[in-house]
Image: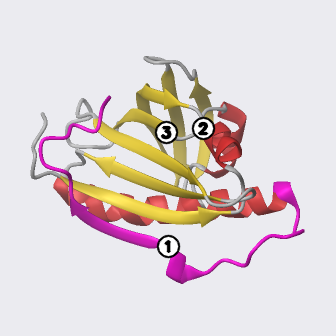
Amino acid sequence: MTDPAAQAAVVRRRLPAPADVVFDEWTDAARLAEWMCPRPARCLNMEADPRIGGTVAFDVEEAGRTFRVSGNYLTLERPHRVAFTWSCSTWLDPAIQSVVTVTIEPDGADASIMTIEHQLLPPALVQQHAQGWAVVTTQLESRLRSTAGAAGAEHHDPAKQRVKPRKARSGSSGAT
């Protein structure tokens, strides 16, 4: 199941919130439901049990159909790292488990740099997931700006975002 040459979807963005606030967005079901699905899709039935082995899952309602994304938390290192498995009911083999790793680095007192690396994806889905993660990252950024208020918030600079498929690190399963 682990192919060292597997590709990954990677998104990196500066967010207008400290690392602990960004971390909490990834572990709270109500918060995740606000931004996780690329609009106009909607997240339904969001579950988040933030403990090693705990469930992270949701239904996606998009274009008149509903499908399920599910996984389990692998890493919870507050406030710097979250990792979980990711499977989708629409994949040719819905039993395949990819791995999403979110790294959050402080960037001053009121900001952080978040990197999402989605590894072990079926190769035909890497670009689609890179685009999806870019959209949800923008949605998360908007949510953080609205919850923190406009005071002191920087304007979005597209040059600070990187979205690209890339080769996964050789020999790394992404799980810890």
- Which element is circle 2 on? loop
- Taking depth in this image into account, of 13 and 37 the one nearest to the observer is 13
Residue in the image at 53% along x and 34% along y = 58
- The x and y percentages for residue 80 are 54, 41
- Taking depth in this image into account, of 10 and 89 the one nearest to the observer is 10
Q: Amino acid at mark 1?
A: Gln
The residue singled out by tag 1 in the image is 161
Badge 2 or badge 1: first in the primary sequence: 2
Using the rendered view, name the quadrant where residue 163 is placed. bottom left
- The quarter in which the N terminus is drawn is top left
Badge 1 or badge 3: first in the primary sequence: 3
- Taking depth in this image into account, of 25 and 57 the one nearest to the observer is 25
The residue singled out by tag 3 in the image is 81
Residues shaded magenta: 147-176
User: Taking 73 as reference, is 64 above or below it?
Assistant: below
Answer left or right for 118 relative to 44. left
- Taking depth in this image into account, of 37 and 26 the one nearest to the observer is 26
Q: Amino acid at mark 3?
A: Arg
Q: CA distance from mark 2 to mark 3?
A: 6 Å
